[in-house]
Image (cartoon, rainbow, N blue to C red):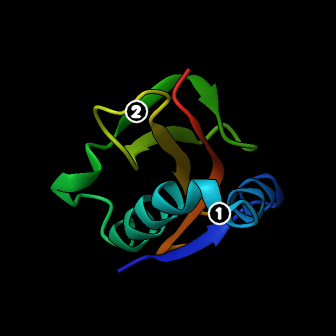
Amino acid sequence: MFKILLSDTASSQLNSLRSDQTYAARVKAIDKTLGFLANPRHPGLQTHEFTSLHGPKGEKIFEAYAQQNTPAAYRIFWYYGPNRQQITVISITAHP
């Protein structure tokens, strides 16, 4: 199992969503996905590499689905590290 860390950006994005009750369903989906992320191979995440971004030290960035079949569905972008058994979430945002 991995420990989940949130970057300042991801933390700010999540706090912003939590502060607006109209996003309650999205926050619930995001929280569920963050729980699944402790096992990054969980099939519900539909995780795949996101090749147009790299982590701060060149790490591979991955994208996990927090929502599907929803307009502007939310995605969670993350990488392995900085230490063993850690995952750092760098962004929680609507799919472009």
Q: Position of residue 74 (x, y in %)?
A: 49, 41
Q: Position of residue 53 (x, y in %)?
A: 62, 27
| Residue that extends furthest to the left in the rendered view of this protein | 43
| Residue that extends furthest to the front in the rendered view of this protein | 22
Q: Position of residue 96 (x, y in %)?
A: 56, 20
Q: Nearer the viewer, mark 1 or mark 2?
A: 1
Q: CA distance from mark 1 to mark 2?
A: 31 Å
**Label 1 neighbour load within 10 Å: few <14, some 14-19, many 20+:** few
Of label 1 and label 2, which has the lower sequence position?
A: 1
Q: Is residue 83 visible in the rendered structure shown here?
A: no
Q: Which mark is residue 21?
A: 1
Quarter location, residue 83: bottom right
- Residue type at mark 1 is Gln
Depth order, front residue of 30/3: 30
Q: Which mark is residue 49?
A: 2
- Vertical placement of 47 versus 10: above or below? above
Who's the residue at 46% across and 59% down the image?
Answer: 25
Q: Which mark is residue 54?
A: none
Depth order, front residue of 67/24: 24
| Relative horizontal placement of residue 4, taking residue 67 as reference (left or right) | right
Who's the residue at 21% across and 54% down the image?
Answer: 44
Q: Position of residue 28 (x, y in %)?
A: 45, 66
Depth order, front residue of 46/1: 46
| Relative horizontal placement of residue 85, taking residue 8 as reference (left or right) | left
- Residue type at mark 2 is Glu
Q: Secondary structure at mark 2?
A: strand
Q: Is residue 36 visible in the rendered structure shown here?
A: yes
Who's the residue at 50% across and 29% down the image?
Answer: 72
| Relative horizontal placement of residue 40, taking residue 89 as reference (left or right) | left
- Vertical placement of 73 versus 43: above or below? above
Q: Secondary structure at mark 1?
A: helix
Q: Quadrant of the N terminus?
A: bottom left
